[in-house]
Image (tube, rainbow, N blue to C red):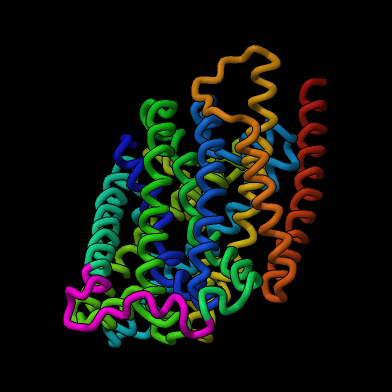
């Protein structure tokens, strides 16, 4: 892939269901104070991506943070981080297919939701079975379209708030009325954080894609510097316009926040057009996340931490079994869309947020260990950001605080506890797999 593919793919993977659909859930959980959730999560993302960018510049690998966790803390941790992220992306793929189908049914109620989800899964599985160059070009144009749509939304939203559209501007009243800026208290901010964490998920795919990019050390460090501020602008700018334009407890805002905002501006026709663009945007995110998931399970297989069949590739060097395995849950969710069309998306969005926090923790700790080890052993470290290790320590404190706040909210507590149990199971499994692998290697040597 080229540098432009890398930048647009990471933007494309992050600007998906989390922004276009999930932002409504975040607003419903925290009210206008969801902006605090975005600011906190945004700070962590900046620091995590900076740490990740340094490690990628030093040693590009398709397993990215899983590889770095293994090098820093051993194969059991690398196994856990890699498998957890792969599971997370499999859930995200299903969520993107479901969200796309759900929205398209509203805009064009011709085919049932489950059938649309099935078509999307088949089409994007096929795209990911093409060579990486064709995949990168396809994703570039998909991502460019949705970035343009978000920029257009920001411009139209500002025009509305300043009184330039057919509807009257609400001013700033929606920030203070309907229970005030913090209608759900700090617990609402905590509940919003996991929804927001899911929204920011996907940026880290830039590290996974580095192994298939020309001059990864230079291109990845450049991509990291530019991507983060763009994501923050798109997310915080869009959500700020939403909570100013409409009451935070509006049902329309919870279900389709972008379209609801344009309808409130007196531009319903534009809202319908944006709805179609949002479907395309969600499918772009599905495409990028399927790529990331397949490369992660491929990397795990190469290191002996996943079934060996997952490292097989075709003549175009596409890991076909890894792609097919990464789509399996998405196809299962086609059936779930048939049974529970209304409920399945919310369930998927709620599961993912806490798993991403584990990835953040592992990345920050791995960076701390590997950079100190490189300094101790006088190993070259090509891209070293300032204020180390304090930036890592600040990010770790914030992430631990997020977990602490989340434990005070029943729904969030369930997610954190469930993810923690999954982590324990994966660590034990990873230790057993690693021990068996070492045992086999000893027998081969003999």
Looking at the rendering, the stretch of residues picked out in magenta corresponds to 159-179
Q: Determine whether 6 is above or below 441 in the image.
A: below
Pick the front one: 387 or 278: 387
Which residue sits at x=47%, y=70%?
A: 22
Q: In the image, residue 329 lies at what x, y percent?
A: 54, 66
Q: In the image, residue 354 lies at what x, y percent?
A: 64, 61
Pick the front one: 384 or 440: 384
Does residue 328 appear anywhere in the picture? Answer: no
Which quadrant is the N terminus positioned in? top left
Which residue sits at x=69%, y=48%?
A: 397
Pick the front one: 279 or 429: 279
Q: In the image, residue 240 lies at what x, y percent?
A: 39, 66
Q: In the image, residue 293 lies at what x, y percent?
A: 51, 51
Q: Residue 441's image quarter? A: top right
Which residue sits at x=64%, y=26%?
A: 371
Which quadrant is the C terminus positioned in? top right
Magenta portion: prevailing SS class: loop
- Number of numbered discs present? 0
Magenta span contains residue 84? no
Magenta span contains residue 161? yes
- Residue 112 vs residue 205: left or right? left
Q: Determine whether 327 is above or below 73 in the image.
A: below
Pick the front one: 61 or 352: 352
Does residue 148 appear anywhere in the picture? Answer: yes
């Amino acid at each position: 892939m080229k540098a432009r593919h890398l930048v647009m793919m990471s933007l494309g993977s992050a600007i998906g269901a989390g922004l276009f659909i999930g932002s409504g859930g975040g607003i419903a959980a925290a009210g206008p104070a969801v902006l605090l959730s975005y600011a906190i999560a945004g700070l962590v993302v900046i620091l995590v991506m900076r740490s990740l960018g340094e490690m990628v510049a030093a040693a590009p690998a398709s397993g990215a943070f899983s590889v770095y966790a293994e090098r820093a803390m051993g194969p059991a941790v690398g196994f856990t981080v890699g498998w957890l992220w792969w599971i997370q992306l499999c859930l995200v793929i299903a969520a993107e297919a479901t969200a796309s189908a759900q929205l398209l049914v509203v805009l064009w109620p011709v085919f049932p939701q489950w059938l649309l989800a099935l078509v999307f899964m088949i089409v994007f599985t096929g795209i990911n079975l093409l060579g990486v160059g064709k995949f990168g070009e396809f994703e570039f144009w998909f991502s460019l379209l949705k970035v343009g749509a978000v920029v257009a939304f920001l411009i139209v939203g500002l025009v509305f708030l300043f009184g330039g559209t057919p509807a009257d501007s609400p001013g700033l009243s929606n920030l203070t009325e309907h229970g005030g800026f913090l209608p759900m208290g700090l617990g609402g901010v905590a509940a919003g954080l996991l929804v927001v964490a899911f929204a920011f998920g996907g940026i880290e795919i830039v590290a996974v894609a580095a192994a298939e990019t020309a001059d990864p050390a230079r291109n990845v460090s450049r991509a990291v510097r530019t991507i983060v501020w763009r994501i923050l602008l798109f997310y915080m700018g869009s959500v700020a316009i939403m909570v100013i334009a409409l009451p935070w407890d509006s049902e329309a805002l919870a279900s389709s926040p972008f379209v609801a905002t344009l309808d409130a501006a007196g531009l319903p026709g534009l809202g319908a057009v944006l709805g179609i663009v949002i479907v395309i945007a969600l499918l772009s995110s599905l495409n990028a996340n399927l790529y990331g998931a397949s490369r992660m399970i491929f990397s795990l297989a190469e290191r002996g931490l996943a079934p060996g069949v997952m490292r097989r590739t075709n003549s175009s060097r596409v890991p076909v079994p890894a792609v097919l395995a990464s789509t399996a849950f998405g196809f299962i969710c086609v059936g779930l869309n048939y049974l529970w069309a209304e409920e399945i998306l919310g369930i998927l969005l709620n599961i993912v947020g806490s798993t991403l926090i584990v990835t953040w923790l592992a990345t920050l700790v791995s960076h701390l260990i590997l950079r100190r080890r490189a300094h101790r052993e006088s190993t070259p470290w090509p891209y070293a950001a300032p204020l180390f290790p304090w930036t890592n320590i600040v990010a770790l404190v914030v992430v631990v605080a997020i977990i602490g706040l989340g434990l005070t909210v029943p729904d969030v507590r369930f997610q954190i506890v469930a993810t923690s149990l999954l982590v324990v199971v994966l660590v034990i499994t990873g230790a057993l797999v690693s021990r068996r692998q070492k045992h086999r290697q000893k027998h081969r040597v003999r």
